[in-house]
Image: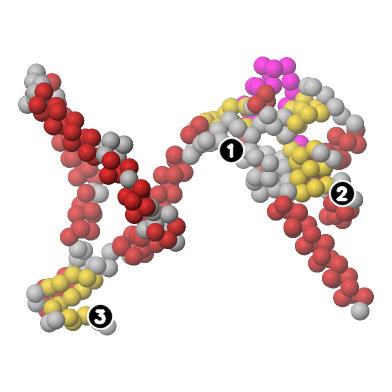
Amino acid sequence: MIKYVYHNKKYLRKCPFCNIILEYTNKKNRNFADKKRKLCRSCTQKEVQRRPEIILHNKNKGIKLSKKYSGTGNPFYGKKHSDKTKEKIRKFQQALDKKHNPIFQSKEFREKSIRVGKANGMYGRNFYDVWLKKYGRIEADRKMQKLRKKRSINMIGNKNPMYGKSPPKGSGGGWSGWYKKWFFRSLRELSYMINIIEKKKYKWESAENNKFQIKYIDFNEHDRTYKPDFLLNDKTLIEVKPKKLMETPNNIRKKEAAINFCKKNNLEYKIVDIKIIEIDKIIKLFLNKQIKFTKKYQDRIKKIIKNRHDRNERNLR
């Protein structure tokens, strides 16, 4: 059953899209609009402007007006502003410019116009909170999804500020840290260091630097860069990766680009998988101070050790 709002003998209903209160002069019009789920004027206009035929019409109209008023079609074509008009424009611009207007430079004005902390209108809020209050949940979710998509597009490939740069130490989702002053970004890299490089006494260096930066185009046709994990004996680039991820579309493209890079630089390229060392060995190396994890995983390994200690105490009771 629909519940209506009565206020000062006016017939009211909510816009089904933005939840704004709409007023009607009589009950019949209100009920008809509610039955048809009619939108408010603002939402109707937005819906109309999103129609493909309207977008195309506006685009064609803009092209026609641009041609009509360009060159000799412009009413101001061949004319110039008088010195008097130029002076008026200059003074008006100076009045708007904070650098030239002494009012905006005064200490009192700056103190009154401060927008830091709680004085800021957006303090404790974000875009979604504002949209939720103004338009309702459906439109707020749509706007947020559109904003995320736009941000994602603006940060893809060479548009990303980190494009071509090595990721900071400790970034990413893998267990990262130092083993005898060698930095690793995952437990697989750590396992490769201990069970292959150290055991077989290979000469090696990290390949995660600009010298071994490989450019490739990903599955979505975006420019990307990639750096392997190790260089062994000055001739073999090694990428440590789980076997299940080796044949994904992006990793296949990475592999092709890396092989071409190695051919040009007289190198070899190998992708290897390795069994991760047991947690008991990791704990032993950590307690012997041979491994130092980044802060996030330092706390996690301490928690694992504590839980094991508590479990052993309970079993002894």
Q: Mark 2 touching mark 1, by CB under 8 A? A: no
Residue linked to disc 3 = 2
Q: Residue 185 location in percent, x, y?
A: 72, 42
Three-letter amino acid code at disc 3?
Ile
Can you give x and y, in whole percent of width and height, for residue 77 in the image?
9, 21
Figure label count: 3
Q: Which element is circle 3 on? A: loop
Quarter of the N terminus within the rendering:
bottom left
Give the residue pinned by disc 2.
289
Residue ID at (16%, 32%): 89
Residue drawn at (26%, 39%) of the image: 101
Span highlighted in magenta in the image: 255-273
Q: Does 13 sit left or right of 105 as displayed?
A: left
> Which tag is nearer the camera, tag 3 or tag 1?
3
Magenta segment includes 130: no
Amino acid tagged 2 = Lys
Residue at disc 1, secondary structure: helix
Quarter-of-image position of residue 26: bottom left
